[in-house]
Each structure stands twice: as structure tokens, then as C-alpha cells.
Image: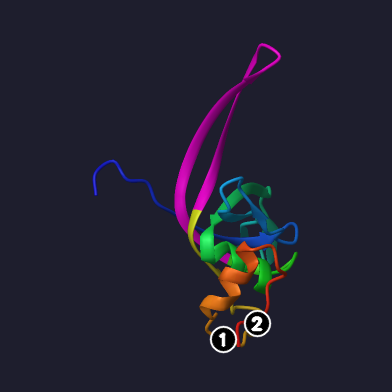
Amino acid sequence: MAGENFVSISGNLTRDPNLQFTAGGQSYVQLGLAHNARYFKDGAWVDRQVSFFDVTVWGDLAVNCAESLRRGLRVRVVGRLEYRTWEKDGESFSKVSIVADDVAPSLHFATALVAKAGRATVEAASNGAAPTSGK
């Protein structure tokens, strides 16, 4: 589609997801993602500079992330870029972040047991209860 932006990136989580709620009760988490590209040169792996990204996850996906993901886990994020600007103390700031449409653990270096989350899990979390397995 014309005018749409799309990003797909993989990297390691820099902090545990912390499930939070807006004043209106919408669930969200803020993820930190570190992406470190490597390449092979002269018989050895060379690390490029690490890039850090802030990722916002909303709704049921946020609840599932908070329940399933932990710091250090390699994940793949699909979403869109969001550009924000603001002023503080007369100084202008801007930031590009990612709003996630989907987040998944990378199975390159890990295994996962996938379980379908029940609706009760999401509803309980939005009422302030700790997330459960949804089984």
C-alpha cells in the first residue's frame, strides 16, 4: 500500500516486559530491543555497532508478551515505525520507535512450547490481576 511503512527486525530484549495500563484500561508493554548485525571477514566474525530500538506493544499481544518473554530472549518484531516530537524546557526532541503488530520468540537459538492464550487471561490482566498461563 502506498504511504504505509513496515519494519521487521530481530534482536535481544534488553529488559523484561512490564505490563502497564492506560487510564482507559488499555494494556501495553514497552520493550527494549538490541540488534547486533555480524558479518564474516578474513575467517572471523565481526560485530557491527549495536542498534537499540524502543518497541510499544498494545492489547492482547502486550499481555502475552508480558507473560511469555524475558530479558535476553531473541525475538522477531513486525510492525510500523512511529515518529514523535515533543518539547521540554524549550528544547525540541524527536524519536523514532516501533509499534508492534506481532512479536515472536526466535527459534534459532531456543525452543518454545506454544499454548493458545485463553480470553480469561487477557480479561484478568486488564482487571489488574497477574497474567496466568491461560490454560
The location of residue 101, given as percent across then percent down, is: 45, 59
Tell me if residue 82 is in the magenta stretch: yes
Tell me if residue 79 is in the magenta stretch: yes
Q: Residues within 10 Å of mark 2 (few under 14, many from 20)?
A: few
Which residue in the structure is indicated by mark 2? 133
The image quarter in which residue 111 lies: bottom right
- Give the spatial CA distance, label 1 vs label 2: 8 Å
Residue type of the residue flagged with mark 1: Ala
Q: Is residue 13 above or below residue 120?
A: above
Instruction: Tell me if I can see residue 33 in this picture.
Output: no
Circle count: 2
Residue sitting at the far left: 2
The location of residue 122, given as percent across then percent down, is: 57, 70
The colouring scheme, among rainbow, by chain, secondary structure or one colour, is rainbow
Residue drawn 47% across the image and 44% down it: 81
Q: What span is in magenta?
A: 76-99
